[in-house]
Amino acid sequence: MQLGMVGLGRMGNYMVQRLMRGGHECVVYDARPESVAALAGLGATGSASLEEFVSKLAHPRAIWLMLPAAIVDKVLASLVPLLENGDIVIDGGNSYYHDDIRRGADLITKGIHYVDVGTSGGVFGLERGYCLMIGGEKGIVEHLSPIFATLAPGVGKTEASPNRSAEAAAVSTAEQGYLHCGPHGAGHFVKMVHNGIEYGLMAAYAEGINILKHANIGAASHVADAETAPLAHPEHFQYDFNLQDVAEVWRRGSVITSWLLDLTADALHADPALSKYAGRVSDSGEGRWTIMAAIDESVPTPVLSAALYGRFSSRDNDEFANKVLSAMRAGFGGHVEKPAAKS
Ligand SMILES: NC(=O)c1ccc[n+]([C@@H]2O[C@H](COP(=O)([O-])OP(=O)(O)OC[C@H]3O[C@@H](n4cnc5c(N)ncnc54)[C@H](O)[C@@H]3O)[C@@H](O)[C@H]2O)c1
Ligand SMILES: O=C(O)[C@H](O)[C@@H](O)[C@H](O)[C@H](O)COP(=O)(O)O
C-alpha cells in the first residue's frame, strides 16, 4: 500500500523504514530537507514541498502526520486545501483527543477522513514494532489495516493471555498490536491514559530507587544532613546498595519486571550516577490531559496526579511555594533556614 509521511523525526523516520521493509511504498516530506534525503536514499519517494508531496500520492491519498502536537493544526491548514474528496489524514503523534473530535468533524465536511492514532514504542519501534491505538471511522480504519499491521509488533511477539478466549481473539486485532478503539479521539484518549500510567510507573521506579540510594545515611562516613532531625537509628541505614545490580536482579522473575525497568537498569549500567541528567523532567501534555479527563469524570487519580506534580517540582516550579513554607516557619517559630547539605 502507498502511504505519505509528513514529519521524519525520531518517530516518522523509523516508521517509514519499517513500512518499506514491509513492502509498502512511502512518499515522504519534512521541513528539514536532509531528513527527506536520508529516507530517499533508502528507497522512499522524497518531496521538497507539501505541494510536491501531495502530487506524488495516488488518490485516495493516505497521509500520516508524525509531528509535534502543537504544529498539527498549522500543517493541516496548508495541507487540507491540497487534498480531494476521499483522502485520509492520520495524526499519529500525541495530539489531545479534543482536537481530534474537532478535526474529524471539520474534515468530513470537506470529504476528508481523519484518523487519530496513539503510537507507542519510541525509538525502539523500528525493530520491536509500534503499539497503535486508533480512533476514527470503521471502514477507513479497515482500509488502512495493511499499514497498521506492518507498523505493529504482530501476533506471537507477546504470549497470549491465558484467559483470552479464541472467540475474542478472532474478532480483535489487539493480539497483532493495533486496535480500533472507537470514533474520532478514541485512539488518542487511550494513548493519553497510557501515558498517564507511564508517568505513574516511571515515578514509582524513580522513588523506589532513590530510597535505595539513600539507605546509607546512617553510615559514619555520610555527611549528616543539617536540614533534618538526627536519625534515631543510624544502624538502620548502613547499606551501600549496588543499584545496577538491584535493578538487574529485579529484571529476573520479580513482580515489577517491565520495559521501563529494563531501560532503567541499562541507564544505571551506563552511568550509575546518571550524571548527564540534571533531573528536570519535561511533560508533553498527555499526563496533564489524563488528570483533566479524570477530574471531568470525577475519578480519583492520586498516583497519576502525584507523578505529574513531581515533574513540575523537578523543574523548580515549587520554589516559591517552598519559600512561603520557610517564611511561615520563620514567622511562627523563629525557625531559620539551614544551609543545604553537601551531597
Ligand atoms: N519520540 C517518542 O518516543 C514518541 C513516541 C510516540 C509518539 N511520539 C509523538 O510523535 C510525534 C513526533 O515525535 P518525534 O519524537 O518524532 O518528534 P521529532 O521532533 O523528532 O520530529 C518531528 C519532525 O517534524 C518535522 N517538522 C516540524 N515542523 C514541520 C512542518 N511544518 N512540516 C514538515 N515537517 C515538520 C521536524 O523537522 C522533525 O523532523 C509527536 O507528537 C510526539 O509526541 C513521540
Ligand atoms: O508511548 C510512548 O512511546 C511514549 O509515551 C511516547 O509517547 C513519548 O516518549 C512521550 O511523548 C513522552 O511524553 P512526555 O514528554 O509527556 O514524557
Image (spheres, rainbow, N blue to C red):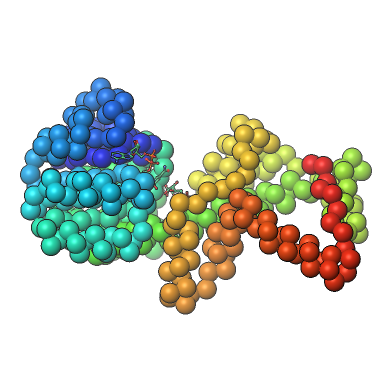
Task: Give ligand 1's quarter of the image.
Answer: top left
Horizontal arrangement in the rendering, residue 265 relative to residue 194 (left or right)? right
Examine the rendering and report whether any part of residue 231 can be seen: yes
Q: Position of residue 209 (x, y in %)?
A: 67, 48
Q: Quadrant of residue 57?
A: top left
Q: Position of residue 108 (x, y in %)?
A: 14, 61
Q: Position of residue 233 (x, y in %)?
A: 90, 57
Horizontal arrangement in the rendering, residue 232 relative to residue 251 (left or right)? right
Say if 265 sits above or below 162 in the image.
above
Horizontal arrangement in the rendering, residue 161 relative to residue 141 (left or right)? right
Q: Residue at x 84, y 49 (%)?
A: 339
Q: Residue at x 83, y 68 (%)?
A: 331
Say if 101 sits above or below 311 in the image.
below
Say if 211 sits above or below 270 in the image.
below
Horizontal arrangement in the rendering, residue 200 relative to residue 142 (left or right)? right
Q: Quadrant of residue 240?
A: top right
Q: Residue at x 28, y 35 (%)?
A: 30
Q: Nearer the viewer, residue 197 or 325?
A: 325
Q: Nearer the viewer, residue 231 or 325?
A: 325
Q: Position of residue 232 (x, y in %)?
A: 91, 59
